[in-house]
Amino acid sequence: LSNAPNISTLIHLLSTNRSSIFSGHHGQLTLTSVFLDEYRDRLFLGGKDVLYSLMLGPTSTESKELYWPPLPGNRENCIQTGKDPQTDCANFVRLLQPYNRTHLLACGTGAFQPMCAFVYVGHRGEHVFTIDPVNVENGRGKVPHDPSFRFASTFRGGELYTGLTADFLGRDSVIFRSMGGRSTMRTETDQKLLHDPKFIAAHVIPDNDDRDDDKVYFFFTEKASEPGDREGAIHTRVGRVCANDVGGQRVLVNKWSTFIKARLVCSVPGPHGIDTHFNQLEDVFLLRTKDERNPDVYAIFSTISNVFQGFAVCVYRMADIREAFNGPFAHKEGPDYQWGAYEGRVPYPRPGVPGREFGSTKDFPDSVLQFARSHPLMWRPVFPALRRPVLVQANIPHKLQQIVVDRVEAEDGHYDVMFIGTNVGTVLKVITIQNGNSLETEEVTLEELHVFKQAIYVGSPAGVAQVKLHRCETYGKACAECCLARDPYCAWDGFTCAQYTPNNKRRYRRQGIRHGNPALQCVDQNLSDVDVTEDDVVYGTENNSTFLECVPRSPQASVSWLVQRDDRKEEVKLDDRVMATEQGLLFRHLLHEDEGVYICRSREHGFSQTLVRLSLQVLQGDAVDELMSRDNAGFSDSIKERSAGSYRAWMPCTAYRSGTSSHSRLWFKDIVQMIGPSNLPHVEEYCERMWCNDKLRRKHKSMLEKYRQAQESARKARSKSSGERNRMPRDLKARDV
Ligand SMILES: *[C@@H]1O[C@H](CO)[C@@H](O)[C@H](O)[C@H]1NC(C)=O
Ligand SMILES: *[C@@H]1O[C@H](CO)[C@@H](O)[C@H](O)[C@H]1NC(C)=O
Ligand SMILES: *[C@@H]1O[C@H](CO)[C@@H](O)[C@H](O)[C@H]1NC(C)=O
Ligand SMILES: *[C@@H]1O[C@H](CO)[C@@H](O)[C@H](O)[C@H]1NC(C)=O
Ligand SMILES: CC(=O)N[C@H]1CO[C@H](CO)[C@@H](O)[C@@H]1O
């Protein structure tokens, strides 16, 4: 997979300041379901024997808890059947759906005895949350018995559609319809219809304005039945039923007469003309647009082979899905025949399509029902838009598990920002950009980090985190940097990198997501402001290691290092001793001739920028010892004791004081590492006195000046009479510091 992108930034959610975390009232939430109620501004959570309601206020979040254990006796029965008391024999709440204007439907596994109840949540604006523990319904067919089984469900018109295994042993795989006034519907038990399915998602998608024509789509994997597949191979399917299906009169009584399914293909061309298929569906997100008949279907797939483990995101258009369902049926004459497209006469009304002339499916001719029963699979598969994934990740250390997509209006069109949750608790924020009409797409990984307003809610068994969608201010202080970040949520407003709102009437609004070219986007802005022009001084000690930090803000930028000596600039020669790392330039063994001004430049989309200028000064070991020992602060003793002798990257006061400078952080980190966190107050005190008092700073400067002069004369003296060791001049005493 040559074009496998490389996600280089990993921001751990829990370590960023933009998230707030809810982990239940007792610490361990064991989250098993989430429903984000955008109308009520509430987040409902289901866990083990518990339900929560979170009122999402602008400043604070108020939470209420409901205890909802299994019915009396069921926990004991469950344990008696040999199930695990901790992981099986509790009421794991798996389903939370809005039911009517005042109630939610909640269903839990009830210790392998599924049960449902109505939860009173009140009207918008009030925070009520009660459940009637007596008024409980049988939850069979609504959630699986086993808390570890996946299932999918959706509500339509008071009826619940579910794809699940609906029995104690987990063998009865079925698509169900229950609740509401009509009789319960299900699929026949037949491997032709569903063969060991794993249901991932279910959605109602209308065909037109007539609600009677609505279809319910199921996304699932099942064992492959087509030829050419290995034993045990699985395929991903999209299946659907008509909402107005009430089954047949003589055959298919209370069974679906409109169930059809097609294969969803997600693959990339490989060497020797063999495609790499991603067959295992992991998650589906329906990106709804103004045209409710045509949402975009985003799906994460995985593949695990001996060669590699990979993930892909494919996007499907409803038009392509409908076309497959309107195309030929897959047909097999008998067990020894090959699959092919059915070429005979398809009875009318065509299965999977409600017939207008017929009052209901009960009036369908038997021939239609017989055909429907024997031909559930379509011959043509559904290919993704552009016939290829929008994102491919191969041999990465984490798994892509969940996806939500936010469509963002930006200056140059709209962008679909994907938020992809991983199994290591991070969220990738990715946009893909199509360049012109070509099939090449470019992925921009913005940050690794249920979209609702300004936040994304991320659930894990441990809790729920609310994460802000963007932090434009982190993209820098200049138009060019804001532009290079290519985050559709952000734009340059003339002064700062700020949140972009399409109707904002401010005069300056620069965004360059498609090309990310600041030279175009920021013509009249002062590009030279972007370049760092002042040198920061860094001290290293001879024969020891030193590190010059330089991290570009954009993960796509490439970095180069130049060194300037006596007005001559040249590229830094890299070898075993001087190494370029992702964070900067590492000198493993500093030589005196390494002295010079080091310039770190980043380059992206033809735009280059000076990020850092560091004047590296090489101190000689003895001199440093001397310098430290002459300090009268108690600090110096502790620093000497604890440090293994590498006081690298000393920073001048300006850097320390500005607080935000990355070098100061590095320097500060080093100091803390050397002396240990318990001595932190000492460091503050020391730094304050040492670097951050203007008067002292001037002194410090002159001290260093003297020190350098002393070194110079010592060197001269040395070259005259070798063997004589250079010493610090006497006047460079601690009192000066
Ligand atoms: C985190 O955010 C809050 C509010 O936005 C702010 O007051 C606080 O200083 C931030 N903390 C850190 C460590 O950045
Ligand atoms: C909602 O459904 C519940 C449970 O059936 C019922 O008690 C309640 O009256 C309903 N509320 C409304 C507003 O229809
Ligand atoms: C651009 O920035 C440079 C350096 O900060 C400054 O000298 C120059 O005057 C600025 N030009 C304009 C047009 O603002
Ligand atoms: C650094 O190493 C060289 C050779 O190993 C040695 O001659 C020199 O004295 C060392 N310098 C210091 C300051 O230790
Ligand atoms: C001055 C200084 O930091 N010297 C150290 C350089 O590194 C060696 C080990 O590599 C130490 O022994 C020195 O103290």
Image: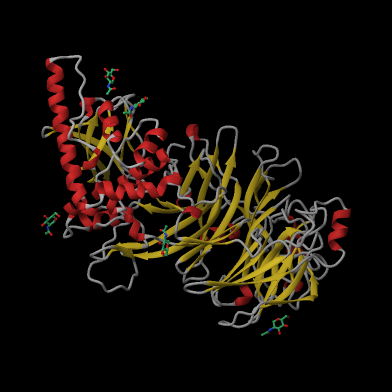
Q: Nearer the viewer, residue 241 or 44?
A: 44
Asked whether, in this view, residue 628 is left or right of residue 252, the answer is left
- Indicate the quadrant where residue 127 lies: bottom right
Residue 63 lies, with reference to residue 581, above or below; the image says below
Q: Would residue 77 be visible to someone looking at this image?
A: yes
Residue 588 lies, with reference to residue 312, above or below; the image says above
Residue 208 lies, with reference to residue 481, above or below; the image says below
Q: Nearer the viewer, residue 312 or 647?
A: 647
- Indicate the quadrant where residue 722 lies: top left
Asked whether, in this view, residue 548 is left or right of residue 393, the answer is left
Asked whether, in this view, residue 115 is left or right of residue 572, the answer is right
Q: Would residue 532 be visible to someone looking at this image?
A: no
Residue that extends furthest to the top in the rendered view of this protein: 722
Q: Nearer the viewer, residue 687 or 343?
A: 687
Query: How is this picture coloured?
Result: secondary structure
Q: Position of residue 437 (x, y in %)?
A: 35, 52
Q: Residue at image x 48%, y 39%?
A: 269
Asked whether, in this view, residue 342 is left or right of residue 391, the answer is right
Q: Position of residue 271 (x, y in %)?
A: 48, 33
Quadrant of the picture in which ligand 1 is shown: bottom left
Task: Classify the position of the C terminus by image quarter.
Answer: top left
Q: Nearer the viewer, residue 234 or 571?
A: 571
- Indicate the quadrant where residue 309 lies: top right
Q: Position of residue 255 (x, y in %)?
A: 77, 65
Q: Position of residue 36 (x, y in %)?
A: 57, 69
